[in-house]
Amino acid sequence: MPQNLGWHPEQFIISNGGDELITLVSEAFLEPGDEIIVPAPTFSEYEFGAHLMGANIVTVPLGESYAFDLDAIVNAVTERTKMLCICSPNNPTGTYLSKSVLHHLLGILPKHILVLFDAAYSQYATADDYTNGLEFVRAGYPIVVLQTFSKIYGLAGLRVGFGTAPESIIQHILKVKEPFNVNALAQAAAAAALHDDEHVRLSLEVNMQGKTQLYRSFRDLRLPFIESMSNFVLVDLGSGAKSVYEQLLTKGIIVRFGGIWNLPHHIRVSVGKEEENSVFVHELTEILHHHL
Ligand SMILES: Cc1ncc(COP(=O)(O)O)c(C=O)c1O
């Protein structure tokens, strides 16, 4: 979070969750027939914003191991391209775009293309070469960084997030924002959360331990998975993935079935506390060994 000095209020816009920021950016920048580039699989709201405005979605598949494919992204640019949506860490893969690659990308993209950099899960990312994009806002590139209080801060139900961008971009987005889009309760909670460093530290620690626990279990079960910079892990269960998902549901364990992202062999599991992860792994093992 940009608590450090040197930022100006004019570089921020507060929104009713990160979702609203995506809609606002779409409303402010997109027109019918425009194109947005979306590396996929990813979060669905970018498409929603484009649909709303009659813009066309140009999907670029992620590359090997779900890494961002820089060449494919650049090759997808046309004169109608208005926006590029980068979710880093990406939902649902947990993969990320490194700082040097983002820098390179921003350097070669035509300047009229706005990069919507979704850093909703940024506080979970621990890789040395991760960037939450803010340094590129500071440097004046055409980039909007999305952040939210729904993830590591745990305030999803209150609906508050924000965007950070060069002032001229924020001014443009403000034109489509309703004046009272974030309620007073959410504002108060967000302001308090920004100072709760201990909560963030602890959540990150629990998440890192949980990922280690899940990775170990997946290796024991010989299940391929993607190492994640986020608070969920995408794991490959083969053709029985949907059945496993449904059986987990009957045990009260809710994971995401990958079919919604066109990944019918995968589930995405949120990282829980140690005990929750253990229950999940126990039930998963039971299902894989006895009910498939
Ligand atoms: C990648 C990503 N971006 C943004 C959001 C928006 O979250 P919210 O609207 O709760 O701030 C989500 C929520 O699931 C998400 O996964």
Image: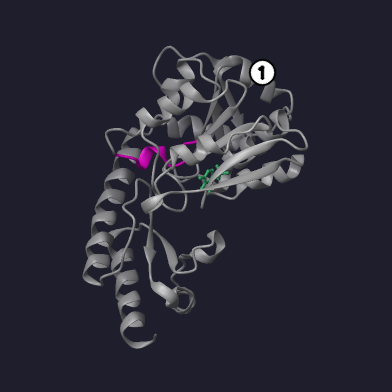
Give the vertical position of 13 relative to 125 (above or below): above
User: How far from the left and from the top, in percent, is residue 88?
Assistant: 44, 40
Q: Quadrant of ligand 1?
A: top right
Task: Please provide percent x and percent y for residue 190.
Answer: 50, 34
Residue 95 to residue 142: above or below: below
Residue 123 is a magenta residue: yes
For the residue labelled by badge 1, is the local secondary structure a helix, a strand or a loop?
Answer: helix
Residue, disc 1 = 171
- In the rendered structure, does residue 81 fall within the stretch colored magenta? no
Image location of residue 263, percent across then percent down: 49, 63
Query: In terms of depth relative to the viewer, which is nearer, 265 or 169?
Result: 265
- Residue toward you, 177 or 242: 242
**Rendering quarter of residue 81:** top right
The residue carrying pointer 1 sits among few (fewer than 14), some (14 to 19) or many (20 or more) residues within 10 Å by Cα, namely: some
Would you say residue 1 is visible in this rendering?
Answer: no
Range of residues picked out in magenta: 118-126
Residue occupying image coordinates x 44% and y 65%: 267
Which image quarter is the N terminus in?
top left
Q: Amino acid at mark 1?
A: Gln
Where, by quadrant of the figure, is residue 134 drawn?
top left
